[in-house]
């Protein structure tokens, strides 16, 4: 690939400075490599290797001892260590990544036809994986950091930086959170954490400082993990753990989510929308049972559905017939609305003060395949439906629960392109409402701390 | 299409008997048609037309009057009416359906190239829409009956009958529930209801009789619908409504679900699996954060994860190395397991008495694309993993949250073919656990009523 290669750190010439060492040798050898790294004057080392304290048992602390050895050598030379047992860092602006280099894989596949069971065709359509973005992701799991890195382009966003924390023997969650707090390239911070290794109070203080500047999304893994060890005290244990984290989130303004899909939904929300001023939302829906389901899913997740003004109903009735339409909230359309009419109505709803958001729950398929529009036209129309700086959220729901390959492909492309056009296409009405509610709650927190300070 | 056509009911010859009239003329004309239907001696009429009491206001009861007129004429002749304002009945064995006749649409598209914005290519791959199955679906929403009918083949199941209820001026929910209770073709009853028009106690009694014979899944729409009318009393109102239905379900053994996706998940579960004897489940997972997420999602939804026996751990360690694997529960595999090994482990887990179900949460993509297996081999392997009559549930999770078109197509096919091969591939670990928990709860209800009687 055209890079110069040395067989040891010590053989790198003195006039060739090195910023970062990535160490991927067996655990036992890492101390000697760190020693070489120190002598070369490299300031940072990412220890990829596993085989440290994560493998220790009650009776065997070999891994822990090895870690202490690393720290001792690193301190001597002033090296800061990330890891061990982690994927490291993605920093697109520095062309630093631990994601699969897609072109290399493609070239390998082309050269070795037998080994082509992994097919990355079409991947580049979703954007180069090392494009830089505005999301910082800190992860206590290397696998989740990797997965997030690989799929985020298909969700329409990229990263300022990703950090896989590993065993955190030196640099830890708090170091990175503090860095991202002031990082001008980072607009949204998301994290996957299982436990806090250092002082919990320091974490809470730092969180408060950070959420005052930018949203922090926390997915806490292991809420229920005591389950199999203590089946009897099961319910008590997990409720306590969950309540603790919920209280912490309420006090710090952190946005707590429950799983990976909720995390990516929330990142998209924070990146794309202004904070909704109220919980009031207007829902556009197919009629009948579908409208009832949308109402249940919106209100179950905390949003409120105020009525339309009489003036607006009269205005809409000028171009949408009353038969088969129901201009309550949700606004139900029996199949007579065109894309142009729908976009016009969305614009009019956004001018009503009782709505901070508009949820477009009529499936994209319906207005695309059913009414002969192209996806291009649809996206263009939707993204222009609100006047700029309206401060309102236009939210789309794009479920891919259907049997048409064409529809599934369309929904995938729709979700990805939505974000690049200023709106989010969520996978369900419930998911849309949940994210919108959490975003509103963060806004209430910001209001509260402004009043106090 | 080769069918004989008459311009009125009265012009059908006497020697041509008719089983069912489907009436789709403007509402005002329906009484005169029902009169003709009566004279012809047709025993059943499905009134498709809308424009009845559903359009009435407080001041205008025209629709209600029209309905009373229909009932009066029908009583005179002994006609039973379904509707008005509904899609009617699907009865595959009688070749009766209200779903789009796909071949007709294809022919129309072929003849009229300009009107081909609806593309049904590939649909027939998922099975003919009028194949008969074992699920009865009763729906108070025509749209939901239609959607369910259209997508169920892609989920791997078909219907014994589907009924869209409409305004229920004669035949109603209870009539159909009573019929399906004793219908030998119906193994599972599912329903979407918004309200009970007749005596609630009669409904509860009938439900008890029915659930003693076969599972009844209820999706109650409109749990939250009072929201926009009474924002102030919001939370009180909805909690009361929900608690009422929850109590009713607990007392009758009905399986309550919250939305359409949960309903289809539950239908697949009841159709496919024996009732789990306990809540104990073994989870196979990718390692690290993914394993933590799977644990949270399983336990959040009510299942329990007991430990593996020491004997089993030793047996597995004979062919899976300890490094990068973790044989607690979830069983974590760091990427070294082959399909054959995975299937072998599933079989061994099924023999442990503490597990009533095994959740295979390693994505199908991993063992297919990542390990060079075909979908055919994968499905064959999975469906043979448990010995027949083990009484245990092998549950798959097949998330299609990825950016590869190939992976999405594979997951779609996997979900559809899973059911035909004796297992369910759910869209998430949480959905799998939730359905399994509800199925277990139904089993507990059955045990309880056996003890009482």
Image: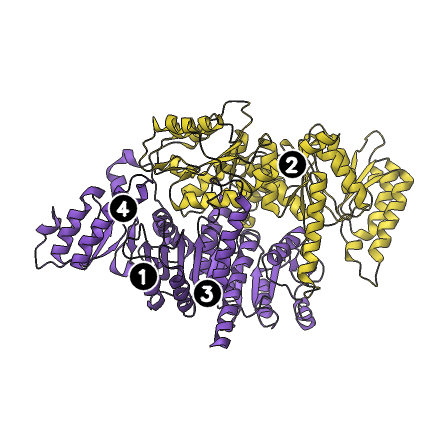
Chain colours: A purple, B yellow
Whether labels 2 and 1 share one chain? no
Distance Cα–Cα, label 2 vs label 1: 50 Å
Residue A436 relative to residue A102: left or right? right
Q: Is any part of residue B400 visible from this angle? A: no
Q: Which residue is mark 2?
A: B442
Whether labels 1 and 4 share one chain? yes
Q: Is tag 1's residue or tag 4's residue first in the polypeptide sequence? A: 4
Q: In this orientation, which residue lies closer to the viewer: B2 or A233?
A: A233
Residue B330 relative to residue A52: left or right? right
Residue A415, relative to residue B447: is it above or below? below
Checking the image for residue A175, the label placed there is: 1
Residue B41 relative to residue A97: left or right? right
Determine contact: label 4, label 2, CB under 8 Å: no
Q: Which residue is mark 3?
A: A252
For image coordinates 71% across by 47% down, the residue present is: B140
| In front: label 1 or label 4 | 4
Q: Which residue is mark 4?
A: A64
């Amino acid at each position: 690939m055209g890079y110069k290669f040395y067989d040891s750190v010590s053989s790198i010439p003195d006039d060739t400075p090195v910023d970062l060492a990535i160490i991927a040798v067996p655990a036992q050898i890492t101390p000697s490599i760190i020693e070489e790294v120190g002598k070369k004057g490299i300031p940072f080392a990412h220890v990829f290797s596993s085989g440290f304290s994560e493998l220790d048992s009650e009776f065997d602390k070999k891994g822990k001892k090895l870690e202490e050895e690393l720290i001792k050598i690193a301190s001597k030379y002033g090296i800061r260590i990330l890891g061990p047992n982690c994927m490291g860092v993605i920093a697109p602006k520095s062309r630093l990544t631990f994601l699969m280099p897609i072109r290399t894989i493609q070239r390998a596949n082309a050269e070795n036809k037998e080994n082509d069971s992994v097919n990355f065709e079409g991947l580049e359509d979703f954007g180069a994986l090392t494009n830089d973005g505005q999301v910082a992701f800190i992860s206590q799991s290397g696998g989740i950091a990797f997965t997030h890195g690989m799929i985020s382009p298909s969700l329409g966003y990229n990263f300022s930086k990703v950090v896989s924390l590993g065993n955190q023997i030196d640099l830890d969650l708090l170091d990175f959170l503090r860095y991202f707090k002031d990082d001008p390239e980072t607009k949204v911070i998301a994290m996957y954490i299982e436990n806090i290794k250092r002082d919990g109070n320091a974490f809470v203080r730092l969180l408060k400082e950070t959420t005052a500047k930018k949203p922090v999304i926390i997915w806490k893994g292991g809420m229920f993990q005591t389950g199999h060890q203590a089946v009897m005290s099961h319910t008590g244990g997990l409720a306590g753990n969950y309540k603790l984290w919920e209280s912490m989130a309420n006090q710090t303004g952190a946005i707590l989510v429950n799983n990976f899909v909720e995390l990516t939904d929330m990142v998209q929300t924070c990146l794309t929308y202004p904070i909704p001023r109220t919980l009031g939302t207007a829902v556009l829906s197919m009629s009948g049972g579908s409208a009832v389901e949308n109402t249940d899913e919106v209100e179950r997740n905390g949003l409120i559905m105020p009525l339309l003004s009489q003036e607006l109903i009269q205005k809409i009735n000028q171009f949408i017939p009353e038969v088969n339409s129901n201009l309550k909230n949700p606004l139900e359309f029996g199949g007579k609305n065109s894309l142009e009419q729908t976009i016009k109505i969305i614009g009019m709803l956004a001018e009503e003060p009782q709505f901070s958001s508009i949820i477009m729950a009529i499936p994209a398929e319906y207005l695309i395949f059913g009414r002969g529009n192209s996806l291009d036209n649809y996206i263009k129309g939707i993204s222009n439906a609100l006047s700029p700086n309206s401060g309102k959220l236009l939210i789309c729901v794009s479920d891919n629960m259907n049997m048409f390959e064409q529809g599934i492909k369309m929904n995938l492309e729709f979700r990805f392109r939505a974000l690049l056009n200023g709106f989010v296409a969520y996978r369900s009405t419930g998911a849309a409402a949940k994210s919108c509610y959490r975003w509103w709650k963060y806004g209430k927190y910001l209001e509260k701390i402004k009043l106090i300070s």
